[in-house]
Amino acid sequence: MACNSNRCVSSDSKNKRKLPYIEPSIRVIAGFFLSLIGVLLYFFNDLILILIGSLLFISLNLFQSGLTHYCIMEKGLKLFGFRSELDEIKDLSAKAELSASIQKNYIKTLNLLNEAIVEISQDGTILTASDGWSKLISHNTLDPQENANSILSYIHESDKSLVIDMFKKVFNSDESVHRVRFRLKHSHKTEHWIGGKFMLEVLSDSDIRIRGVLRDITDSYLQEKQIKHMAMHDALTGLPNRILLDEKMDLALEGAKKNNSLLGLLFIDLDNFKQVNDIHGHKMGDHLLVSVSRIMQKRLRDHDTLARWGGDEFVVVLPELKHVSDVRRVAESLMGILETELVEEGFDAIVTLSIGGATYPADANSTETLLVQADKALYCAKDQGRNNVQIYTELRESNLGYYDFEMTNRFSQAIKDNRIQVYYQVIVSAKNKETCGFEALARWHDDKYGWVSPGIFIPMAENLGLIQDLGKQVLAKALEDFSSVGGNSDLVLSVNISNRQIMHGDFTGWIENFIKNYDVRPEQIKLEITESLAQMDIKKAKAILESLRETGFKLSLDDFGTGFSSLSNLHNLPVDELKIDMSFVQRCEDADGKIMLETIVAMGHALGLELVAEGVDSPECVTIMQNLGVAKLQGYYFSKPIPWGEVTELFISNHVVTRLSNKA
Ligand SMILES: [Mg+2]
């Protein structure tokens, strides 16, 4: 370093002043010769001796004055192998010059690097610094009252304590190298990150210092931060993703447990988001998600977490709530602000929120359960017609929601355990009341709730996305039971098929294959569909129904009359029969009801369809239906839905006997 180099230069000049000196032994010998010359001159007044004496005297003086090149004495001594102090000094001087030059080159090389090398005292005063340090602090501006010689003056306020702690460690710990990452102050207010390695340097008992190598790591650090951010955040909205949400939820729950505080969680779903995407395109959908995120974020506190759960779903973590009712307050406030601000931002589509909330410790003791309870509350909010807030705690206290949730869970489990039962209701010929077939009906008996109406559990299966599982389970059981009648029987098994089931994948191929496992022909199966199928993709629906018919299946339009919106498409649905809904059949004795029935029957006949009356529960109703020209009857008058064992006993044996006797 520069100071050391200066020190070397001053030392060289001192060495040069010592050059005239000769080694003591030489001086003794020279003294001996001088004395001898003096004695000789005294006793022999001879010119030759005077000359020799003078030469020796001059030689000695030359030797002493450092002009050794002309010094006979020096040359004479060297002949005897003597080495003068001058030679020694010359060698040392050459070595010192070489060493100084190497050191200078090292410093030049270090200055070429971007790293800065500093030596600092225990209190942070900069003792020496390479040029790299000047480069590192070139964007720093110190306040006038700050000490420019202290390294701490250049360090970002937030990181000062970190660096001071590290300095203490350097002095107190056994580790040789200490690493720390900190920010320098930056006049442009951008982040200026430094990676530092520090070690202790003991020069003497009183001179102990810290040597540090500092490097600008801003680019690599920010890249690393960016990569970490990308792994933890949603690319579209920049909100925390599920990974980070898990971390935040764990931390929040840990804090709530430790401080005995309330933690709230909101599960948010954007209503009608699919329509926004369908009508305005995905770009607008994305734009909406970004706006919704930003608006909600604005309303939340700094320590709340808003995360994107996926699609149009968000989760909000609300730590340190004062009261359970705060969850609802925050949820409603989010709904309010969105409604106003989205309109201000020019979104003409009406976007509302369905929100489900839950709290710790009232509803759950783990983040996982808290999410499940909030999700259940959200399901309830959607079920209530969307655009509303449901809080799990309130639902549980009112019992209604809890009942629903528990029943939902028990129903899902019943489907998983294959515990849904199938009962059968007989369908008879209106003409001779002979058994034509049976309609398979799903029945669920729960240990806690008893028999649950299909009017409750079928919509539940639709909402839970379990309708296909339910349909498949009922079909399999019905086919298994029905296969006992044999493939040659003319009895027909009617099975209800949901729209979702029929429109999913290659339904025709699937069911054709499925019945191969049983001794049943497609012609023995009647698939009951509902009018609402016509409201879906009518072209696709028609194609599927036609392929089913070609395969041999019979098709029936169930609950006919309850969905007039599809009446215009009725002729497009290639079905074999219409099942008149029981709401019409049961009004057959009213004048108005009868007119309605006559209209339906006339229409059915005009379309060439066979008619079946559901809900026939009296002999009068039977007569009216017979007179109207309805072909088949179904209802409590003949039989309520019963298990297959009773069906066999009551109807199949008789049917076989009747058929045999008819043939005989
Ligand atoms: Mg039906």
Image (spheres, helix red, strand yellow):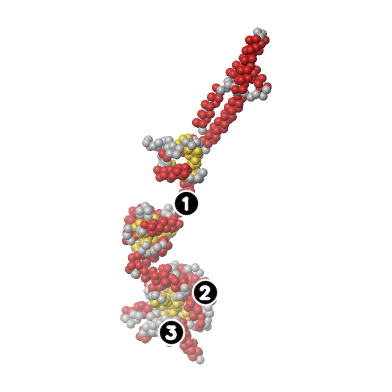
Q: Is residue 451 visible?
A: yes
Circle 3 packing at 10 Å, graded few (<14), some (14-19), many (20+), is: some
Residue 483 is situated, as x and y percent measured from the top left of the image, at 51, 80
Residue type at the position of mark 3: Ser
Residue annotated with mark 2: 514
Residue type at the position of mark 2: Phe
Kindly state the secondary structure of the residue where label 2 is placed. Answer: helix
Circle 1 packing at 10 Å, graded few (<14), some (14-19), many (20+), is: few
Q: Give the residue displayed 51% in from the left and 29% down from the top.
A: 7
Kindly state the secondary structure of the residue where label 1 is placed. Answer: helix
Residue annotated with mark 3: 429
Name the front one of labels 3 and 2. 2
Residue 264, numbered circle: none
Name the front one of labels 1 and 2. 1
Cα distance between the residues tagged 1 and 2: 50 Å
Cα distance between the residues tagged 1 and 3: 72 Å
Residue 403 is situated, as x and y percent measured from the top left of the image, at 37, 70
Circle 2 packing at 10 Å, graded few (<14), some (14-19), many (20+), is: some
- When asked about the image quadrant of residue 300, the answer is bottom left
Residue 424 is situated, as x and y percent measured from the top left of the image, at 44, 80
Q: Front-most of 207 and 324?
A: 207
Which of disc 3 and disc 1 is earlier in sequence? 1
